Structure formats: structure tokens, C-alpha cells
Image (tube, rainbow, N blue to C red):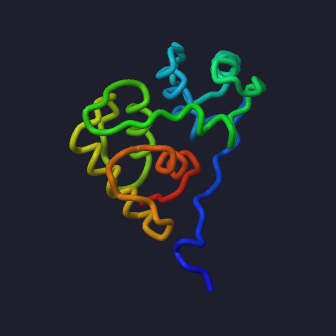
Amino acid sequence: MTTTTDRALDPWPIVKRGARFHPVATLQHLLNSRGHDLEVDASFGPLTEAAVRATQRDLDLDADGVVGPITWPAIVVTVRRGDKGHAVRGAQGELDTRDGFDLVVDGVFGPLTERAVREFQRALSAFDVEVDGIVGPVTWQAMVSGMVSH
């Protein structure tokens, strides 16, 4: 018998050069939050790969240019109400692509973004995800792995 605590989130996706669409735009926003200046075009090309490698080196990770279960947790940025910037845009973009969430991707974590995060987290109740309105590592993992269409 499986209990809710036995259920695991979908794994972090593996994203590398040549990837397009989800979750590449989110990755690009997160890289921009770490000081890069990438065009957020959802296409993992040579500039995104160079930014990934540079970030991996900065974080003392293997600079292979591949974003997977080691790199994702190291690059995500916890965002909450009152925060602004590229990482907030990444979270808003993730939520906006799901049915039922109609967010303006403006990089400002206000009450509408917080409400959408809480709804997303409630949809993950079978995975014991805390409904706190904060996009931390667990919520990021659920978002970038494509869980919950709402």
C-alpha cells in the first residue's frame, strides 16, 4: 500500500544544448538571476550552454553544460512575496503556462503570484508539499519537472 509520504516528486529534468521550450526559459531566467544576460527564448543554444558552464564553475560543480539533478538544486533561487527579478519571472512563467493560472510575468512577486503558488502547492498535496506560498527547491522541482497542469 502506498501512502502519501511514499510518493516522490518527478525527478529534476535533464536539459542540455539543443533543448527547446519547457523548462529552458525558466533555466534562462534563473541564469539571468545569477548575473548572466541571456535572451529568454526557450532555446538552449551556445550562449545558454556557456552560461550554464560558467555558473557550474562558480558553484564548484562539474562544468559539463548539462542541467540535471545536481545543477538544478544549486541554481534555483528561493522567491517569495515582495521579491523582484529574474527568478520571480521564472516562477511566474512556470505558473502561467499551466491551465488556470493567468499571471503577468513581470518579475514582481505580489499577492496574485503568491496565490498562484499556493494553488500549485495545494495541487501537490499527495506529495506532502508545504503550502506556504514560497517557491523553494521542492516547488521549483515540481515546476520544472512539469508536474501539475492544474
Q: Residue at x 29, y 35 (%)?
A: 109
Judged left or right of residue 66, residue 134 is left
Q: Give whichever of 125, 47 is nearer the camera.
A: 125
State which quarter of the image contains the C terminus.
bottom left
Q: Is residue 69 above or below residue 86?
A: below
Rendering coords of residue 4 (x, y %): 52, 74
Q: Is residue 76 above or below residue 28?
A: below
Place residue 111 in its image quadrant: top left
Judged left or right of residue 12, residue 123 is left
Q: Give whichever of 147, 77 is nearer the camera.
A: 77
Rendering coords of residue 44 (x, y %): 66, 27
Place residue 28 in its image quadrant: top right
Q: Residue at x 41, y 44 (%)?
A: 135
Q: Residue at x 28, y 46 (%)?
A: 114
Rendering coords of residue 64 (x, y %): 78, 26
Q: Give whichever of 81, 94 is nearer the camera.
A: 81
Judged left or right of residue 92, residue 49 is right
Judged left or right of residue 97, residue 55 is right
Residue furthest bottom as drawn: 1
